[in-house]
Amino acid sequence: MIDLAIRALIAFALSSALVPVCRVAAGRLGFTARPHQGRWHKQPTPLLGGVAIATTVLILHALSAGTQLPILLLGAGLMFVLGLIDDLVTLRAYTKLVAEVAIASLFVFFGYRLGWSSSLTLDTLLTMLWIVGLTNAYNLLDNIDGLCAGIALIAGVSLLTTLLLNGNVTPEANFLALLVGATAGFLVYNFHPASIFMGDSGSLFIGANLAVLSLGSPNGNGGASNVLSIIAGPLLLLLVPIFDTTFVTVSRILSGRSATQGGRDHSSHRLVAMGLSERRAVAVLWTLAGLGGLLSLAIHKFANDWTSLVAAVFLLAMIIFAVYLSQVRVYQDADERLLESGRITPFVVSFVYRRRAAEVLLDLCLVSIGYYASYRLRFEGPDFAMYFPRFLESLPLVLGTQMIALFAVGAYRGVWRYFGLMDGVTFAKGVFFGTLASVSLIVYLYRFENYSRGVFVIYAALVVLMLVGSRASFRLMSEFAHRRRQIGDRLVIYGAGDGAAATARELLSARQGGYRMLGFIDDDPDMARRRVQGYPVLGDFASLESLITNGAVDSVVITMPVIDVDRLKRLQTLCEEQQVSLLRLRVELDRLVAVS
């Protein structure tokens, strides 16, 4: 363990020293990434950061381990050379793909294999897809400052921990420690605003190494003990690059656009379009990668039914997250013509019937998970095995009656974006009637023999929580984005009553609002230090004057139906002097209009 830490620190130091050298060399030789329509960065940035990463890893491994892992070194080195050539002369997409397939076949030929099935032919094809797919996933993930290197660092640490849980320090662990340290050394210079990019040489090198190392040793399965560990572990470990690549590919294909064409429609770009700063958008994806890594470790160590349930819920949450991101607008009004022609990714998926079908499928999964979890919570150890046949024979009844009940109460008529308390009541009614109908059928068919009333009480509570949570997730994500918005006008609402709450909800939910909510102003002393919809009451009219005078606010919205004329004129004059937008809610028009 100490030896691994020393290796990582040495790699970190060497990489940190080499990155500035590569940055200067790239600048002098003209190897820079220049801004254009399909790129996110706005100024020329040196490439070749990947040279520092790969050089550090390859040199230190050669010095410390000699000829160990020759196939990994050869394949990763070839992938690095391929990426470097692409950085220097820009290869065609199919040329890179052919070369990547050839390199992946080298790994498979020498025994690196997933071990997901009993068919060697199928495993060979899946392993080729795994290596090529993940290598390109990290390449696509390098789309915003600090994202690819940070995700790689998290995945590397998680994978290294998994290897250590096997009880011995392998050559793969030693190599991975060098990769982690070198990536961390580069990341120091790649935080926003980045002074250097890793380029394809770095992303392909990192992606290929992590893809291959996640397979375990040649002719082995990495020590996995069951199907869950073999399949779910690696998928969760490398979740974010898989998620981002799948999300972008599917959304572009649905829009009739080439999946290999660049663009600003990745998950990171959509988080920024929601109003998050680049650093916070990256931090969100880092957090998801960390959760995936922790779940992978839990599956590797425990591999029981509870880890399976948590992993299933997490994957469903990621699917909901993808659906939410698909509705975020990432292109400007000037691109409407391209949007209509299908050449850019749409920001709203408006296929109503497909969406409703997806809701039904989601609820089937949630009801199944809830019913299974209720048996797991009610019975433990041998008791669960004894009652498991009752679960299997009643599961179809529970699924059928529950889905009919949800449909009957109108659960599939709501809009997720506007989910409210009454929608939650609707789902609670649906679960209640579904549970009642399920119990009635079981009593009629089986006389409720060997069934537990406690199971259905737990089931109803769990399913209500999951159904309501899935629908409320859109509002929760919107609220999260609004409270961390870094762009748009700083907004203060004068008045903290019902009209103010409705105004805040309307302004912040508008797709083109672009406001950053600071809080409310109210003259009622009892409202001081209170919170409305989670935002603070900042003070009275004097506090509002101070905010405007100090340049701390860009827009003021008046929601009070009655306001003193002299105070209104005073506020209007102050806003004109400080160039602050002043709006007032006209109840009779039910909209916001500028005060004249």
Image (cartoon, rainbow, N blue to C red):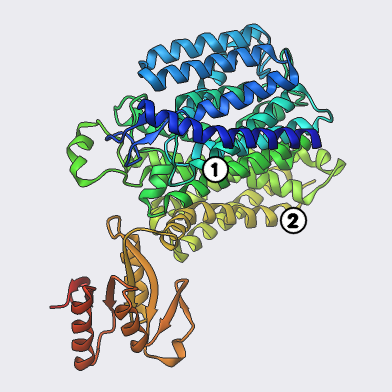
Query: Residue at coordinates 38% horizontally, 13% vertically from top-left?
Result: 94
| In-front residue for pair 113/437 | 113
The residue carrying mark 2 is 454
Is 210 situated left or right of 354 in this image? right
Is 290 situated left or right of 530 in this image? right
Q: In which quarter of the image is the N terminus?
A: top right
| In-front residue for pair 374/268 | 268
The residue carrying mark 1 is 188
Residue 551 position in % (x across, y down): 31, 74
Q: Check disc 2 and give the amino acid type.
A: Gly
Callout 1: SS: helix
For the question of whether residue 286 can be seen, the reply is yes
Residue 137 position in % (x across, y down): 49, 28
Q: Check disc 1 and give the amino acid type.
A: Val
Query: Residue at coordinates 38% horizontally, 55% vertically from top-left?
Result: 275
Q: Does residue 88 lie above or below 425 as drawn?
A: above
Query: Residue at coordinates 64% horizontally, 57% vertically from top-left?
Result: 461
Residue 172 position in % (x across, y down): 72, 23
Residue 581 position in % (x across, y down): 22, 72
Residue 523, by quadrant, is bottom left
| In-front residue for pair 54/170 | 54
Q: Does residue 60 lie above or below 280 as drawn?
A: above
Q: Does residue 128 lie above or below 591 as drawn?
A: above
Q: Counting residues from the N terminus, which is met first, the one under dot 2 or under dot 1? A: 1
